């Protein structure tokens, strides 16, 4: 799985722009949380190369870039959680899930 790392606020414009071409998957990960690591591993284990044609995968390290997570929460009107996935389509959040609710199958069904 080839994550696109989010490290600063300017990349949120890229996510929005990309979401008009095809859906964007945003994975907010806490590197110190075992639940977050489990959710990340389950997603990566199931991911196939061709899935990137359906969802552009973006990854945010919450511990190093909390200000970016706060901006995401404000822009999309979604309460911050960790771990958390958001799917962005046409500049809007169309799906969000947290913790053990994060499911590869659900993401692929969108």
Image (cartoon, helix red, strand yellow):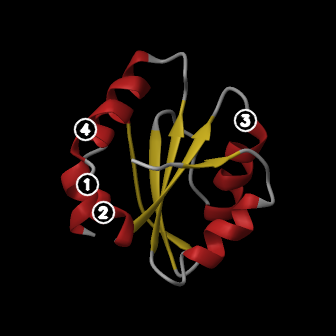
Q: What residue sits right under mark 2 in the picture? A: 51
Q: Which residue is mark 4?
A: 45
Mark with earlier residue (2, 4): 4
Earlier sequence position, callout 2 versus callout 3: 2
N-terminal of the pair, mark 3 or mark 4, is 4
Residues marked 1 and 2 touching at CB (< 8 Å): yes
Could you say which quadrant of the image residue 105 lies in? bottom left
Q: Horizontally, is 2 left or right of 104 in the view?
A: right
| Residue receiving disc 3 | 66
Q: Earlier in the sequence, mark 3 or mark 1?
A: 1
- Left or right, 105 with reference to 14: left
Pointer 3 with pointer 1, Cβ within 8 A: no
Residue 63: where, in percent of width, then height? 67, 26
**Dot 3: what SS?**
helix
Q: Nearer the viewer, residue 45 or 24?
A: 45
Residue 36 appears at what percent x and percent y?
43, 27
Question: What's the CA distance linking mark 1 and mark 2?
Answer: 5 Å
Write the residue at 23% across / 57% down: 106
**CA–CA distance in space, label 3 to label 4:** 26 Å
Q: Secondary structure at mark 1?
A: loop
Which quarter of the rendering shows the C terminus?
A: bottom left
Residue beneath disc 1: 48
């Amino acid at each position: 799985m080839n994550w696109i790392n989010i490290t600063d606020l300017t990349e949120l414009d890229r996510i929005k722009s990309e979401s008009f071409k095809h859906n964007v998957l945003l994975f907010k990960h806490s590197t110190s949380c075992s639940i977050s690591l489990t959710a990340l591993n389950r997603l990566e284990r199931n991911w196939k190369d061709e899935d990137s044609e359906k969802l552009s995968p973006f990854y945010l390290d919450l511990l190093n870039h909390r200000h970016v997570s706060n901006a995401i929460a404000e822009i999309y009107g979604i309460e911050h959680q960790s771990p958390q996935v958001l799917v962005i389509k046409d500049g809007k959040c169309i799906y969000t899930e947290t913790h053990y609710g994060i499911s590869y199958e659900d993401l692929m069904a969108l």
